[in-house]
Image: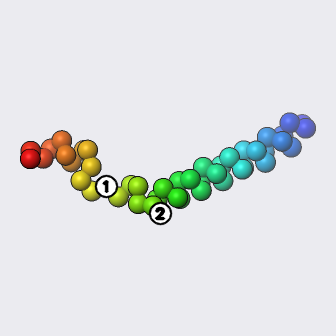
Amino acid sequence: MNVLVVLIPVSLVLGALGLAAFLWTVRSDQYDDDAGNASRILLDD
């Protein structure tokens, strides 16, 4: 039972870090590639 006292806060901190990293990538426009690799394959330059 003492292990849960440690594991629950650690998991919450790691989850918050993951969420913060995801929000940082969304705000820095890393997912806004309209002419990405998927559409470049279909276009013949």
Q: From what the image shows, is residue 13 above or below residue 27?
A: above
Residue in view at x 72 percent, y 50 percent: 13
Give the x, y percent position of residue 4: 84, 40
Give the x, y percent position of residue 26: 46, 59
Q: Viewer-proximal residue, 7 or 27?
A: 27
Give the x, y percent position of residue 23: 53, 59
Residue farthest to the bottom, as pictured: 27
Give the x, y percent position of residue 32: 35, 58
Scheme of colours in the image: rainbow
Q: Residues within 10 Å of mark 1 (few under 14, many from 20)?
A: few
The count of marks equals 2
Label 1, secondary structure: give it: loop
Label 2, secondary structure: give it: helix
Q: Amino acid at mark 2?
A: Arg
Q: Amino acid at mark 1?
A: Asp
Residue farthest to the right, as pictured: 2
Residue in view at x 86 percent, y 36 percent: 3
Q: Viewer-proximal residue, 34 or 12?
A: 34
Q: Residues within 10 Å of mark 2 (few under 14, many from 20)?
A: few
Residue in view at x 89 percent, y 37 percent: 1
Q: Would residue 20 be found to the left or right of residue 33 on screen? A: right
The quarter of the picture where residue 10 lies is: top right
Q: Which mark is residue 4?
A: none
Precedes in sequence: disc 1 or disc 2: 2
The quarter of the picture where residue 19 lies is: bottom right
The answer to whether marks 1 and 2 mark residues whose Cβ atoms lie closer than 8 Å is no
Q: Which mark is residue 33?
A: 1
Q: CA distance from mark 1 to mark 2?
A: 13 Å
Residue denoted by label 2: 27
Q: Would residue 6 be found to the left or right of residue 29 on screen? A: right
Residue in view at x 47 percent, y 63 percent: 27
